[in-house]
Amino acid sequence: MSVIVFTLIILVGSYFAGLLGSLTGLGGGFVIIPLLTLGLHVDIHYAIGASLVSVIATSSGSAAAYVKEGITNMRLGMFLEIATTAGAMTGAILAVYVPTNFIAILLGLILISSAIMSLRKKAELIVQEKNEWAVKLKLNSSYPTANGVVEYSVRKVGGGFVMMIFAGILSGLLGIGSGALKVLAMDSVMRIPFKVSTTTSNFMIGVTAAASAVVYLQRGYIDPGISMPVVIGVLVGALSGSKILVHAQSSGWLRWVFAIVVTILASQMIYNGILGRI
Amino acid sequence: MAQKTIFKDTDMQAVIGWVLRIGVIVSVSVVFVGGVIFLYRHGHEVADHRQFKGIPEFIRTAGGIFQGIGHIRGQAIIQFGIALLIATPILRIIFSAIGFVMEKDYLYVGISLLVLTIIFVSMLSGHAG
């Protein structure tokens, strides 16, 4: 395969990955790794590097819009970034010692569980309970809604922090944003309203990914020939996705389609991982 | 009560939103330009990434990348764009740290600096490994 054909295939694949990722809220680089490793037989280290770079692009791009709307809880994001960056650094160091087939299996499992989580119903929960740490760290905040400004409190700061370390390790090890896990930690543990947790998670993803990308860059995981079409494709795809979202009413069926596609790809990753072919 | 403007969270949100947007636009544009040059020069070679071989020697160091940009080598320009992209969220932390200083929120100045330190240590660990 010539370089130009290889680049065009990745560009088109990444565009659809970015489009679906943004429409379903699962993130851009989500299906990039299976696409590169299973479809084009790219070494998984290059795939992880390229995915991580695309994650930085999409999360920074959309965070720019969310931050201006005032929904993102910047203090909470900054505080939890201590956990996610420390985790990401650990994950990137671990990546050298963990066998690639284990990485493939783990990635498959994470993809499946994230896809399932994206299907669950989202309820807006507002907690007013006062957590001592949340007060000390000034984490309780408010956000604008259609019915005016809503005040909310944050609970179980310690539990959320520990889950963020774990999310960071997975991000550094697998080259994904692990946004689903970050949202889960903020939603079900810290009881933050869904809109705030998704935008704050997105805000943290770029910094988390940067913490492991600085390691990957030096190790040669980030190959320019592969990362170039991935970053451009995913970013443009995500941009078109956000344009469509403004007009579309519901993306219910789309979530199902995406969940099924991700599950098939993930099973392939696990299968090849078990056979030691990745 | 003079018209003294105080730096608020909303101002910081505007600045950070701006930093992120410019960072992504500039870095991805650089990647695009590098990509066009790379494809023009190497488009008809055979693509093979089945085995992990690291990246080409001339773009492994910052010095090499700058030299490559001087010689208008596509891969060096792409790699420079990617480095700018990785720097974007790091730049965001620096801007938030400055914002928290202006708000006199020293707890969060400390937290921002701690996150920066972790990323810096991570960078050094990559160098050693």
Image (cartoon, coloured by chain):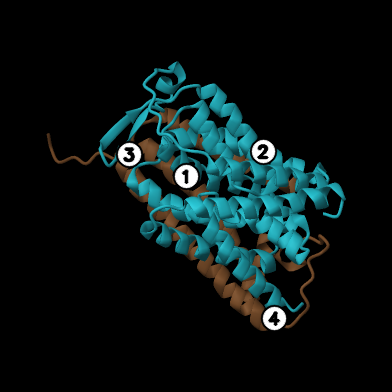
Chain colours: A cyan, B brown
The image quadrant of residue A41 is bottom right
- Determine which of the numbered discs, if any, sits on residue B9 in the image: 3
Check if mark 3's residue and mark 1's residue have beta carbons within 8 Å: no
Q: Amino acid at mark 4?
A: Gly
Q: Amino acid at mark 1?
A: Ile
User: Which residue in the structure is indicated by mark 4?
Assistant: B43
Viewer-side label of 1, 2: 2
Answer left or right for A110 relative to A198.
right
Disc 3: which chain? B
Q: Residue at x 13, y 37 (%)?
A: B2
Question: Is label 3 in a helix, a strand or a loop?
Answer: helix
Q: Residue at x 70, y 57 (%)?
A: A34
Bin the neighbour count of mark 2 within 10 Å (Cα to Cα): few under 14, some 14-19, many 20 and up. many
Measured from the top left, where is residue B79 in percent x and y?
Answer: 63, 64
Answer left or right for B116 relative to A265.
left
Measured from the top left, where is residue B44 in percent x and y?
Answer: 73, 83
User: Which residue in the structure is indicated by mark 1?
Assistant: B94
Distance from Cα at disc 1 to Cα at disc 4: 39 Å
User: Which residue in the structure is indicated by mark 2?
Assistant: A169
The residue lying toward the viewer, choosing from A27 and A263, is: A263
Would residue B22 be visible to someone looking at this image? yes
The residue lying toward the viewer, choosing from A104 and A266, is: A266
Distance from Cα at disc 3 to Cα at disc 4: 48 Å
Measured from the top left, where is residue A164 in percent x and y?
Answer: 58, 33
Question: Is label 4 in a helix, a strand or a loop?
Answer: loop
Q: Amino acid at mark 3?
A: Asp
